[in-house]
Image (tube, grey):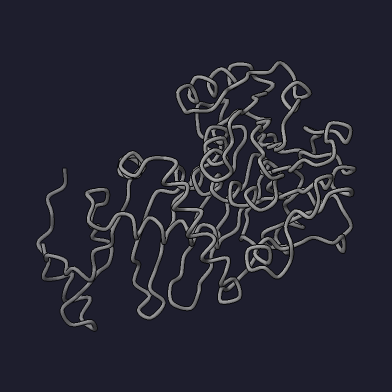
Amino acid sequence: MTTPSDKALVPFVSVDQMMGLVHHLGIEETIRGLAAHIEEDFLRWESFDKTPRVASHSAVGVIELMPTSDGEMYGFKYVNGHPKNTREGLQTVTAFGLLADVYTGYPKLLTEMTLLTALRTAAMSGLAAKHLAPKNARVMAMIGNGAQAEFQSLAMKALVGLEEVRLYDIDAEATRKCARNLAGSGLRVVSCATAEEAIEGAQILTTCTADKQYATILSDNMVGSGVHVNAIGGDCPGKTELAPGILTRSTIFVEYPEQTRIEGEIQQLDPDHPVQEFWRVLSGEIPGRQGSAEVTLFDSVGFAIEDFSALRFVRNAIEGTPYYTPLDLLADPDEPRDLYGMLMRATPTPAA
């Protein structure tokens, strides 16, 4: 077989290698690194191509592509969301992503993004809470204790200084799993029997449930003044977690309004209901939290620029490490026009 040139080899990060990289860096340091890359890219928001994700919906879930480019690099993520998968022993969300050079079109990174999405989602939540949550917020209610719960808790610890997380899930086993995983994390972990119990004393309320339906995880009377609501479970049409009354009395911050109005909590409101773009908070164009009694809401659905940032982070982080494999992904003939000749001169690899 023809030996591929270095320019045709694409760094590939497998699930095993991603886990190795996170252990090598430390999970909280990984989250901080992801948040820093997201902030860097949000501060140059206007340089990116922006479009709502391309979604293919079915009765059982959704498959999406999330593309963007800053003119120099192009990135996309393939991701699914299938709430029923848990009952079949499968992940609700899986993903992979690619980063490419705009000038040549050549891929520069191919990586798993199931773990990476969990980490970047948590990093985005923590970054938003850093600017929107009450000062000295130290207690969070974590409503929904599935695959994202531990990441959210650790991101709030790493970026906000969280000290206590109060857990609730309709599935008690999910809460036991989460509490077990967070033991030794440095957080005080309190398992609660109801959502009402979980929110007692919490300055940050995070909702992250999986059912694909209009749901009321938090009713209006459960959200008092002065809290920050981090709503991340409502992330597709027909799927919400908050009572409309919470939305109408909150200052709402979003990633990209054109996408959030389709998928987020604000799909319940009039299309012209005012929202604030979070990147403008980072740039200093608008304030974040403005008063101690204000209810702030980060209506997070995930946006392609965050995945672009995560891909950039991984590409930088793997340099000089063993946590990737050079992948022979691109046909690269010595004479660019002689692809057929390359094929005919090849020595076939015997079938296994």
Q: Residue at x 88, y 48 (%)?
A: 249
Seen in the picture, residue 81 relative to 104 is either above or below; the reply is above
Q: Residue at x 18, y 82 (%)?
A: 335
- In the image, 291: left or right of 304? right
Q: Which is nearer the eye, 251 or 195?
A: 251
Question: Which quadrant would the C terminus be assigned to in this image?
Answer: top left
Q: Give residue 184's position: percent from left, percent from top.
A: 45, 23
| Number of marks in the rendered image | 0
Seen in the picture, residue 105 relative to 226 is either above or below; the reply is below
Q: Which is nearer the eye, 138 or 185?
A: 138
- In the image, 21: left or right of 254? left
Question: Which quadrant would the N terminus be assigned to in this image?
Answer: bottom left
- In the image, 348: left or right of 283? left
Q: Residue at x 84, y 61 (%)?
A: 274
Which quadrant would residue 280 be assigned to in this image? bottom right
Q: Give residue 194's position: percent from left, percent from top.
A: 74, 19
Q: Residue at x 62, y 60 (%)?
A: 53
Q: Give residue 188's position: percent from left, percent from top.
A: 57, 23
Which quadrant would residue 23 be assigned to in this image? top left
Which quadrant would residue 82 be assigned to in this image? top right
Q: Give residue 64's position: percent from left, percent from top.
A: 58, 54
